[in-house]
Image: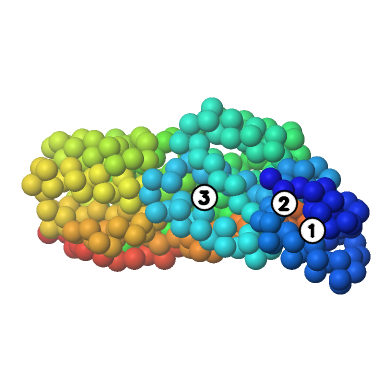
């Protein structure tokens, strides 16, 4: 790899002049600047980001830690974050925890050792992720949570208003005449899942329908959980006429189980999801869901982390973004 020392020697200039030019720090005469930049481009010079960060105490790299990239939701957010950070001159370093708290901690420690200037972080669905947030606080690095949050952790976050979105989904189902509605939930301690479940309960309370814990099915955010839960629901003697799934991934699994049992959606049972994955509108039946503000979520998270790094943001910022109810084929009037 070509170094600044080698460039200085080849051009007969001082190392300091070359360093000022390539790091854009300090005055360099127009003649020398052109000479250095032309030579660097010709020889394919690439800056050593680690060495630069040690000198400037700033890497211009933001770490992004997500639980998964298996579905379109997190890749979409990643693209939006990368696009926004580039506008501000930052590079993105992506890591995936695979919904594993130990892997999550390892990735955080890698970010801290590089180091990065800040971290945008979506925790796993497990309570142990709270300790990983505390690790970031302990190391006094700027970070912002997105999607899943811990309200008791003193930090900035951007997430969807899952509570009110869930209420709107339930009001839609209740308005179609459904009164016995099952809820396929996520993990018990997951903030995303908690918000949806509380919205489900609130809508039932407003409709003066008693909440039944037996109609709530907890589990992982997977197609398998949706499939298994729907099988359990369909085995009930007095089964519900509608099901609210915690997200579209779970809803897709539920649809598969219903089809295997010969249950027609929405003729025999209505179903809703959440998040509006790209595939949700292409399935048969297409899934009634809530469209989250994925574009804005990524932009807001990026701008918050930059504000924390450059100190223009003086205190933690907490945003809850409103979702939009998308009505499709999977929900219909009770028959």
- Identify the mark at residue 47; answer none if there is no mark: 2
| Colour scheme shown | rainbow
Residue mark closest to the camera, 3 vs 2:
2
Residue mark closest to the camera, 3 vs 1:
1
Dot 1, crowdedness within 10 Å: few (<14), some or many (≥20)? some
Sequence order check: which comes first, mark 3 or mark 2?
A: 2
Q: Which residue is under mark 1?
A: 22
Is residue 60 visible to us here?
yes
Q: Are marks 3 and 1 in contact (CB under 8 Å)?
A: no
Tell me where residue 192 appears, x and y as whole percent: 47, 46
Sequence order check: which comes first, mark 1 or mark 2?
A: 1
Task: Residue at 20%, 35% (x, y): give it.
Answer: 232
Q: Are marks 1 and 2 in contact (CB under 8 Å)?
A: yes
Q: Quadrant of residue 267?
A: bottom left
In whole angstroms, how far apart are the C-alphas of marks 3 and 2?
Answer: 34 Å
- Identify the mark at residue 147; answer none if there is no mark: 3
Image quarter of the C terminus: bottom left
Element type at mark 3:
loop
In-front residue for pair 69/172: 69
In the displayed structure, 47 sits above or below 172; it is: above
Dot 3, crowdedness within 10 Å: few (<14), some or many (≥20)? many
Sequence order check: which comes first, mark 3 or mark 1?
A: 1
Tell me where residue 4 appears, x and y as whole percent: 80, 50
Q: Quadrant of residue 284?
A: bottom left
Image quarter of the N terminus: top right
- In the rendered structure, the answer to whether residue 270 lies left or right of residue 140 reads left
In-front residue for pair 123/193: 123
- In the rendered structure, the answer to whether residue 305 lies left or right of residue 25 reads left
Task: Residue at 59%, 30% (x, y): give it.
Answer: 106
């Amino acid at each position: 790899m070509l170094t600044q020392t080698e460039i200085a020697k080849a051009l007969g200039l001082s190392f300091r002049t070359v360093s000022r030019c390539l790091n854009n720090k300090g005055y360099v005469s127009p003649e020398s600047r052109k000479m250095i930049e032309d030579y660097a481009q010709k020889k394919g010079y690439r800056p050593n980001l680690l060495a630069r960060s040690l000198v400037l105490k700033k890497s211009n790299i933001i770490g992004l830690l997500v639980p998964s990239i298996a579905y379109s939701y997190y890749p979409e957010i990643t693209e939006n974050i990368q696009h926004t950070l580039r506008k501000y001159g930052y590079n993105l370093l992506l890591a995936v925890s695979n919904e594993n708290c130990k892997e999550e901690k390892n990735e955080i420690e890698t970010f801290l050792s590089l180091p990065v200037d800040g971290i945008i972080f979506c925790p796993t669905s497990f309570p142990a992720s709270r300790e990983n947030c505390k690790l970031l606080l302990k190391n006094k690095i700027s970070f912002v949570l997105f999607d899943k949050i811990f309200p008791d952790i003193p930090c900035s976050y951007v997430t969807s208003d899952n509570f009110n979105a869930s209420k709107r989904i339930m009001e839609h189902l209740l308005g179609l005449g459904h009164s016995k509605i099952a809820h396929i939930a996520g993990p018990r301690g997951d903030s995303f899942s908690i918000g949806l479940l509380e919205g489900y309960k609130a809508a039932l309370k407003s409709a003066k329908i008693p909440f039944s814990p037996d109609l709530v099915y907890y589990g992982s955010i997977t197609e398998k959980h949706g499939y298994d839960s729907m099988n359990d629901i369909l085995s009930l003697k007095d089964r519900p006429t509608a099901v609210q799934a915690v997200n579209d991934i779970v809803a897709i699994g539920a649809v598969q189980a219903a089809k295997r049992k010969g249950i027609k959606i929405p003729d025999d049972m209505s179903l809703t999801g959440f998040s509006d994955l790209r595939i949700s509108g292409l399935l048969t039946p297409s899934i009634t869901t809530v469209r989250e503000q994925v574009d804005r979520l990524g932009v807001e998270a990026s701008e918050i982390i930059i504000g924390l790094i450059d100190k223009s943001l003086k205190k933690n910022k907490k945003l809850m973004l409103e979702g939009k109810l998308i009505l499709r084929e999977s929900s219909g009037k009770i028959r």
